[in-house]
Image (cartoon, helix red, strand yellow):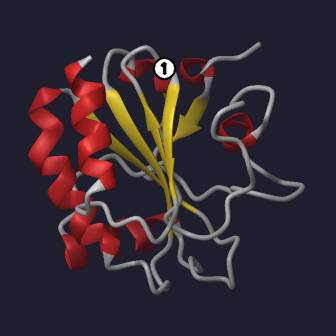
């Protein structure tokens, strides 16, 4: 059976990367979109990233166009939008599908009951979030409405970093 670190993904610049690069770090995996009511969360995600990055925290953004075509841009357009509009410096990856017949294998892993019994279930909208601990275990899942700087997410990130 695969584990989180066994996946290969393309970054937003097109380079293939192994998620094993992030072993030993606490990760927040987020499916993102540029034309969504939750898009302003980019600002809060960047603030969360800045707050905890030096302690070994990374946010991995995965653009997806699965919900009402709210991520229509090319990878280059998405990258430009994120950096110019929200000052995003956390790693961004190539646009993928997070549900349906063409679901990316990473998201199939994150949402499947067999590989993620505690937090399985389809992605419900843009800006769903998964928390991965330093060992690659899925230790939390947050809905689109869960604010990156609200109570739940920073507390869970802090707890994962302290383990």
Q: Position of residue 59 (x, y in %)?
A: 34, 45
Q: Residue at coordinates 31% horizontally, 23% vertically from top-left?
A: 25
Relative vertical location of residue 101 with respect to residue 34 in this rendering, above or below: above
- Quadrant where the N terminus lies? top right
- Quadrant where the C terminus lies? top left
Q: Residues within 10 Å of mark 1 (few under 14, many from 20)?
A: many
Say which residue label 1 marks: 136
Answer left or right for 147 relative to 35: left
Count of numbered circles on the image? 1
Relative vertical location of residue 163 with respect to residue 10 in this rendering, above or below: above
Task: Name the one closer to the observer, 117 or 49.
Answer: 117
Q: Residue at coordinates 72% horizontally, 30% vertically from top-left?
A: 117
Relative vertical location of residue 156 with respect to residue 76 in this rendering, above or below: above
In the rendered image, the residue lying farthest to the right is 101
Q: Position of residue 92 (x, y in %)?
A: 39, 52
Q: Position of residue 147 (x, y in %)?
A: 33, 66
Q: Residue at coordinates 43% horizontally, 79% vertically from top-left?
A: 38
Task: Name the one closer to the observer, 105 or 143.
Answer: 143
Task: Name the one closer to the observer, 99 or 7.
Answer: 99
Q: Secondary structure at mark 1?
A: loop
Answer left or right for 6 relative to 59: right
The quarter of the displayed image where residue 99 is located:
bottom right
């Amino acid at each position: 059976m695969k584990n989180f670190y066994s996946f290969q993904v393309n970054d937003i610049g097109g380079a293939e990367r192994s998620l094993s690069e992030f072993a030993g770090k606490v990760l927040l995996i987020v499916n993102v979109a540029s034309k969504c009511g939750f898009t302003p969360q980019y600002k809060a995600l960047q603030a969360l990233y800045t707050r905890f990055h030096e302690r070994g925290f990374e946010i991995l953004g995965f653009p997806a166009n699965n919900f009402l075509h709210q991520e229509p841009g090319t990878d280059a357009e998405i990258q430009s939008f994120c950096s110019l509009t929200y000052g995003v410096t956390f790693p961004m990856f190539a646009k993928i599908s997070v549900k349906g017949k063409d679901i990316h294998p990473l998201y199939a892993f994150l949402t499947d009951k067999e590989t993620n019994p505690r937090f399985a279930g389809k992605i419900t909208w843009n800006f769903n979030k998964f928390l991965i601990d330093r060992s690659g275990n899925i230790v939390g899942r947050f809905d689109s409405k869960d604010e990156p700087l609200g109570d739940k997410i920073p507390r869970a990130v802090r707890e994962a970093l302290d383990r």
